Image (cartoon, grey):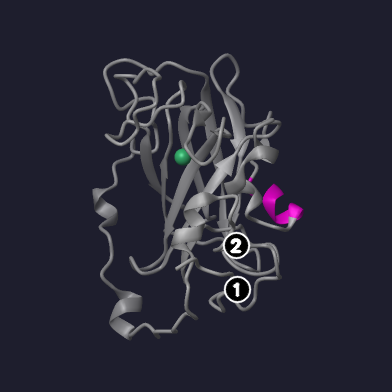
Amino acid sequence: MTPTKLAPPQIRPDDPPGTQPDYFYPPYKSSVLRAPAEPLIYLPHTLTERTGPVYGHSLIRPTDNDLTAQHPDPPQGERILVHGRVLDEDGHPVRGALVEVWQANAAGRYRHKVDQHDAPLDPNFTGAGRVLTDDQGCYQFRSIKPGAYPWGNHYNAWRPAHIHFSLFGAGILSRLVTQMYFPGDPLQPLDPIFNSIADPAARQRLIARFDIDKTEPSFALAYHFDIVLRGSHDTPFEDAQR
Ligand SMILES: [Fe+2]
C-alpha cells in the first residue's frame, strides 16, 4: 500500500505550520515508508516515565566533549569549536540537559559498519561526543569540520556538511534529535532533509553562525548554534518525544 499524506500529527500543537519537518516528504525517499499511515494515538506518559529512568551524569567525563582528543594523535581536518545554549520557549536556559553529537569525519565518512562510502576512515576520529549544559544552558564541543557525503536518495545526492544532535531532558523519554548545518554550504538548497522543513526561516535556525569572537586564534574556527526547545522560534527537530 502506498502511504498518502495525512494531516500533520498533532504532537506539536504549538508549532506554526511548516516550522517542523514534514513526516511525509516524497523528495526524501525514506519518509515515504517511515511516515505514519494512520492518525497518531496519544499515549500520556506516566509519572515514572517522566521522571525515570535517567542516565548517569557521573558517567560523563570532562573530555567527552572534545572529539579531537579521543585517540593518541589528532584527527585530520579543520578544527572547529561548536558552542551555544539550550533554551526553553521563554529564552530561559535549560540546565543539565545531555547534549550528544555524532558526525562524519573530514572526508565525509562515519565510523559505522553500514557506511561503505569510498572515503578514508580516520584512525584518530570516532565522531561522537557528549556534554551536559551548565547553569546558563551552555554547551561546547571541540571537533573537526565534517565532510559532505553521498547518499542513495536520488542520483548524485550529497548531504551538506552537518552534525547530528540529540538532547535528553530529565528522563530518557524526553528526547529531541536534530542536525546542525554550516553557513554558506551550496549543498543545503539541494538537500531533501533540509528542505523537508517548509518554512525558510525555520530552516535557517538549523544553520550555525560563524563566531569570530569565540574562534581560538591559530587553532580553531568557531560556530554558534542555539537550540530552542519549544515555541514559535523553536529548532526544527526530526524526532521528538516531549
Ligand atoms: Fe549524517
Identified at 51% across, 41% down, the residue is 153
Disc 2 to disc 1, how far (Cα)?
7 Å
Does 96 sit left or right of 192 as displayed?
left
Let me know if residue 30 appears in the view: yes
Quadrant hosting residue 174: bottom left
Q: Which residue is mark 1?
A: 8
Q: Which residue is mark 2?
A: 22
Query: Does the closest atom of ligand 1 sit within 8 Å of the Cβ of label 1?
Result: no
Identified at 36% across, 38% down, the residue is 128
Q: Position of residue 37 (x, y in %)?
A: 48, 73
Secondary structure at badge 1 equals: loop
Does 21 sit left or right of 69 as displayed?
right
Magenta highlight on residue 103: no
Q: How many marks?
A: 2
Three-letter code, disc 2: Asp
Quadrant hosting residue 235: bottom right
Does 90 sit left or right of 39 as displayed?
right
Mark 2 touches mark 1? (CB < 8 Å): yes
Query: In the depicted view, which residue is nearer to us: 185 or 96?
Result: 185
Q: Which residues are magenta?
A: 200-206
